[in-house]
Amino acid sequence: MRYYIADCHFFHGTLNTKMDQRGFKDVEAMNEYMIQKWNAKVKSNDEVVIIGDFSWGTAEETNKLLNKLHGRLYLIQGNHDRFLSNGNYNASRFVWIKPYAEMHDDGRKVVLCHYPIMCYNGQYRLDEKGNPKTYMLYGHVHNTHDQRLLEQFIEMTRNTRVAGPDGVERNIPCNMINCYCGYSDYEPLSLDEWIKRNNLSK
């Protein structure tokens, strides 16, 4: 099974108290809760794609954290993953680290970037039943005014009709999913779980 999650911000105390106002007693309690939620869901052979801003901790703190988490880990680099600039972090814990990736998940393509891409590769592709063949998974904006603006853009795009190559007018597909950890109670979710949470067609 493959899961996705964004913006965990392990060790980032101000995310708990200010921006996200997560409500934990302190950063240690936040870290422990996220580790518990992760390991309760993810088995050792599962894959977890982290869509940026995994850890605000030092290389040493992040190494210890990585050794506690289940699964085969992939990292889409975020702007707050400062541990990556320190050669002491355990790069071998990740299958790969990239700023952008495209993967296939049960016959569908996922476009992965920490930053939301409003016009993403494969956006218009549908299967024979009219279901999306491509999803854009992102993080970065958390649950903020930026996410509200993106939601307005997504709705406006979906309500816009354009003529396709066959001359038939259709609504523009827009299947962007914010995988912010706060939306899943800090639990990595599968693509189908994220689709269900966002009320999108499978």
Image (cartoon, helix red, strand yellow):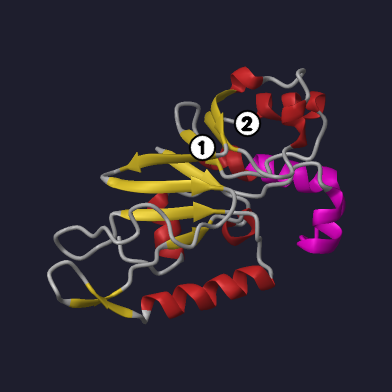
Disc 1 designates what residue? 48
- Specify which label sits upstream in the sequence, 1 or 2: 1
Q: Nearer the viewer, residue 97 or 105?
A: 97
Q: Nearer the viewer, residue 190 or 132?
A: 132
> Which residue sits at x=60%, y=18%?
92
Can you give x and y, in whole percent of width and height, for residue 97 in the image? 57, 30
> Which residue sits at x=34%, y=40%?
104
Q: Main secondary structure of the magenta part?
A: helix
Above or below — where is 107 with respect to 173?
A: above
> Which residue sits at x=40%, y=60%?
195
Disc 2 designates what residue? 69
The amino acid beneath tag 1 is Val
To which quarter of the image does residue 61 belong?
top right
Q: Which quadrant is home to the C terminus? A: bottom left
Q: Nearer the viewer, residue 165 or 45?
A: 165
**Magenta-drawn stretch contains 151:** no
SS at circle 1: strand
Q: Which quadrant is home to the N terminus? A: top left
Classed neighbour count for the residue bearing mark 1: other residues with Cα under 10 Å, few (<14), some (14–19), many (≥20) = many
Asked whether disc 1 touches disc 2, contact meaning CB atoms under 8 Å apart, the reply is: yes
Can you give x and y, in whole percent of width and height, for residue 39 in the image? 59, 37
Q: Is residue 21 visible?
A: no
Residue 35 left/right relative to 190: right
The boundaries of the magenta stretch are 13-36
Can you give x and y, in whole percent of width and height, for residue 191 in the image? 41, 51
Can you give x and y, in whole percent of width and height, for residue 70 in the image? 57, 30
To which quarter of the image does residue 2 belong?
top left
Residue 184 left/right relative to 67: left
The amino acid beneath tag 2 is Leu
Residue 65 left/right relative to 161: right
Report, in whole angstroms, how far the alpha carbon at label 1 lies from the one at label 2. 10 Å
